[in-house]
Image: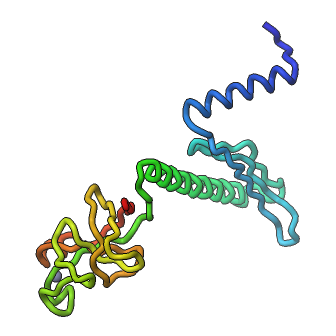
Amino acid sequence: MNYNPSQEEINFVNHALEEFNTTAVGPDNHELLNIVEYDSKGNVIAGILGGTYWGWMHLDILWVDEKYRKSGIGSRLLKAAEEEAAQKAAEEAARAEEEEASQSGKTYLGTFKITAYCHCAKCNGRAGQPTASGAWPYSGHTVAMGGVPFGTKLLINGTVYTVEDRGTPYGHVDIFMDSHEEALDWGLHYLDVYQVN
Ligand SMILES: [Zn+2]
């Protein structure tokens, strides 16, 4: 063993570890997370230095100018760093969702507002009308949403629906149901929506 490896040997080990980690668990997506705070004159009076990776936050340094200790700046910076890390983790999860979806031939559209409607006058103004596309609506199949062509197939909660009606803007899917009671029971959900055609 060599207790005094050269810089080259240290770099070699670091690089090998990086390669191993990337293969084993995917890229670490390391991002710097540095925040500083100023006084009224623009001087740096506190700082937090760290980063995020694999959904974890690590802090290397939390420093507060002596004059400002016990003023709560330290905990404010920590809270800001935690919020920033949580935000990054959420973005990372959304990216992973998107990637997984595109690999399986689906396109992740986003988390959409999902409501339900039926054939009644309360839901449509007039009862028993065909959909805006002319097709007769049926449950487990018909949904309404603007911004995409009729015939667009949306995967929601394991069911593939077809956009055949209008009435809601893009980002808000209205699912056709057999009765007003079922539509009311559904209420409102926010769900991941994929396009499958
Ligand atoms: Zn109804």
Quadrant that contains the N terminus: top right
In this picture the colour scheme is rainbow
Horizontal and vertical percent position of residue 2: 82, 10
Is residue 141 toward the left or the right of residue 60 in the image? left
Query: What is the quadrant of residue 58 in the picture?
Result: top right
- List the single residue furthest toward the bottom: 125
Q: Quadrant of ligand 1?
A: bottom left
Q: Is residue 150 above or below residue 1?
A: below
Q: Is residue 10 above or below residue 87?
A: above
- List the single residue furthest toward the top: 1
Residue depicted at x 29% and y 58%? 157
- The answer to which of 180 and 58 lies nearer the viewer is 180
Residue depicted at x 77% and y 62%? 37
Is residue 75 toward the left or the right of residue 145 in the image? right
Q: Is residue 49 above or below residue 35?
A: above
Horizontal and vertical percent position of residue 47: 77, 54
Is residue 80 toward the left or the right of residue 65 in the image? left
Q: Is residue 165 visible in this depiction of the protein?
A: yes
User: Looking at the image, how many numbered discs can be counted on the residues?
Assistant: 0
- The answer to which of 8 and 46 lies nearer the viewer is 8
Is residue 89 toward the left or the right of residue 18 in the image? left
Q: Is residue 192 visible in this depiction of the protein?
A: no
Residue depicted at x 62% and y 45%? 57
Query: What is the quadrant of residue 197 in the picture?
Result: bottom left
Query: What is the quadrant of residue 27 in the picture?
Result: top right
Horizontal and vertical percent position of residue 75: 66, 55
- The answer to which of 5 and 148 lies nearer the viewer is 148
Horizontal and vertical percent position of residue 125: 20, 92
Residue depicted at x 42% and y 52%? 105
Q: Is residue 84 above or below residue 115?
A: above
